[in-house]
Each structure stands twice: as structure tokens, then as C-alpha cells.
């Protein structure tokens, strides 16, 4: 056990380790308060965070907001290696994005041709990879997004097929699924746990280079094309 210096900025938490502690990639760090309470997300997996200047875009993929359609369009237009992780890697992971630590490790191995990174990661996590890249996001009417998530779970998740929406959401037992608790706000926020996520998210969104709307997808793609001189088709596939 050791006492750590803890600070927070727009990129997330930073831990100052004593000089006698040496870490290698993959080591687990269990971080607790003086009272013994574990910090949210602890234990953490140690990995070096590198900033990649070649990355042009950070796409914050909020689930059920047409992010898959947007990623697919980028891959069709520029090739699979342009986007990371692309369809090839996601297929190996059964369609799921890797943990943020695994994402950083894989990106370190395959970053040469990558120009856009994407994932179900919060803003602070993605921005730490390429602080100077343009940040992109699609937002969806919150109730529509939650209903889409519940239908998705009921269709594809075996444990949910015979459950009601209320049961899938966790509302019946008072343990709400994180996917329905202001997920869009929390993912766009860089506030610390217990901070004002709404205020942080609104502040961050004002700085994003592109904010698209799922229910106005084609119009959003036209604005994206105009801003960045792209030629995406606006082909939408909601699931």
C-alpha cells in the first residue's frame, strides 16, 4: 500500500506514484480512500497513454445513436484501417468494443494508418489518446434511445428475451441499468465521479467540432460533409 497524489483535469484523473513503485503494462492498481472505499472503476489496469498526432477524429460512439452507420460509412469511404477499432477487430470481439486499456494497447500496435478512433468510451478517455483531434458525436432523443436499447437487449441478449422492459431496465428492483441513466450526458462529460455531469457535458459539447442528430441523420451527414469536405452517403441503419 502507498499514498497516492490524486488530481483531476479535463482529461480525467491523474495519480502520482511514489518513486519506489515501478509498473509495467497490464499491472492492476487498486485505489482506495483512506477509509478503505474503492474508487469507481478500481482496480485500474496500467497502460501508457500516448497521444497520436496523426489521428484526425475522435468519434464518441454513444450506443443506439446510429454510430455503427457512421463508422461503416467512414470505413467504406476510406478503408478499414482508417478507423480503429474497425469491423475486423470488432468481429474478433463479438461486436463489442474492447476495454479502454485494451483499446490503448491495440492502438499502440496499429496506429500508423489510423485517422479516426471510435468507441463506447467517455470523452475524457478518448481525448487522452489524441487531444488535438476533432471530436464527433451523434445524439438521440433520450427516450427513443432507451427504448432502442431495451429492444436491442430483448432481441439479442438471451437472458432478456423473456423479460419485460421494466425488468431489463432494472427499475423493478431499484437497480437501474447504467444504459438508461443519462448515458449521453455521462459519456459527453469529463466531470469527476459525483461532479456536475450535465454542466460538464454542455460545456464540452460547445467545443465539439461536430454534433449530429440521429433523427436528422441525413441532414447531419450533409453538414459533416460540408465542414470536413467529405462525401459520405448518409446511409442510416438503426438497430
Image (cartoon, rainbow, N blue to C red):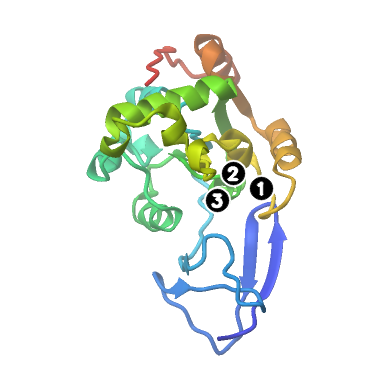
Q: Secondary structure at mark 2?
A: helix
Where the N terminus falls, by quadrant?
bottom right
Q: Is residue 150 visible?
A: yes
Examine the rendered structure and indicate whether residue 42 appears above or below residue 107: below
Tag 3–tag 2 contact (CB < 8 Å): yes
**Residue pointed to by mark 1:** 190
Sequence order check, earlier mark of 3 and 1:
3
Where the C terminus falls, by quadrant?
top left
Report the front residue among 65 and 14. Answer: 65
Sequence order check, earlier mark of 2 and 1:
2
**Residue pointed to by mark 3:** 125
Report the front residue among 42 and 169. Answer: 169
The residue under the point 52% across, 41% down is 176
Q: Secondary structure at mark 3?
A: helix
The residue under the point 50% across, 43% down is 173
Q: Residues within 10 Å of mark 3 (few under 14, many from 20)?
A: many
The residue under the point 63% across, 36% down is 185
Examine the rendered structure and indicate whether residue 191 appears above or below residue 46: above
Residue 232: percent from the left, percent from the top?
44, 16
**Residue pointed to by mark 2:** 123
Q: CA distance from mark 3 to mark 1?
A: 9 Å
Q: Is residue 23 left or right of residue 197?
A: left
Amino acid at each position: 500500500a502507498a499514498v497516492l497524489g490524486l488530481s483531476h483535469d479535463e482529461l480525467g484523473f491523474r495519480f502520482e506514484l511514489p518513486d519506489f513503485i515501478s509498473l509495467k503494462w497490464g499491472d492492476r492498481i487498486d485505489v482506495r480512500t483512506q477509509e478503505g472505499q474503492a474508487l469507481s472503476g478500481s482496480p485500474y489496469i496500467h497502460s501508457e497513454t500516448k497521444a497520436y498526432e496523426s489521428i484526425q477524429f475522435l468519434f464518441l460512439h454513444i450506443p443506439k445513436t446510429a454510430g455503427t452507420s457512421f463508422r461503416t460509412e467512414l470505413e467504406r469511404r476510406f478503408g478499414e484501417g482508417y478507423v480503429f477499432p474497425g469491423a475486423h477487430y470488432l468481429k474478433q470481439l463479438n461486436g463489442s468494443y474492447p476495454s479502454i486499456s485494451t483499446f490503448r494497447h491495440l492502438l499502440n500496435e496499429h496506429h500508423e494508418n489510423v485517422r479516426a478512433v471510435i468507441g463506447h468510451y467517455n470523452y475524457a478517455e478518448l481525448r487522452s489518446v489524441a487531444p488535438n483531434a476533432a471530436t464527433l458525436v451523434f445524439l438521440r432523443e433520450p427516450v427513443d434511445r432507451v427504448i432502442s436499447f431495451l429492444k436491442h437487449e430483448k432481441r439479442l441478449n438471451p437472458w432478456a428475451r423473456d423479460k419485460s422492459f421494466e425488468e431489463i431496465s432494472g427499475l423493478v428492483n431499484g437497480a437501474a441499468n447504467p444504459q438508461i441513466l443519462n448515458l449521453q450526458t455521462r459519456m459527453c462529460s469529463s466531470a469527476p465521479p459525483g461532479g456536475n455531469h450535465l454542466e460538464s457535458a454542455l460545456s464540452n459539447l460547445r467545443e465539439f467540432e461536430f454534433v449530429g442528430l440521429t433523427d436528422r441523420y441525413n441532414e447531419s451527414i450533409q453538414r459533416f460533409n460540408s465542414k470536413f469536405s467529405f462525401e459520405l452517403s448518409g446511409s442510416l441503419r438503426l438497430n
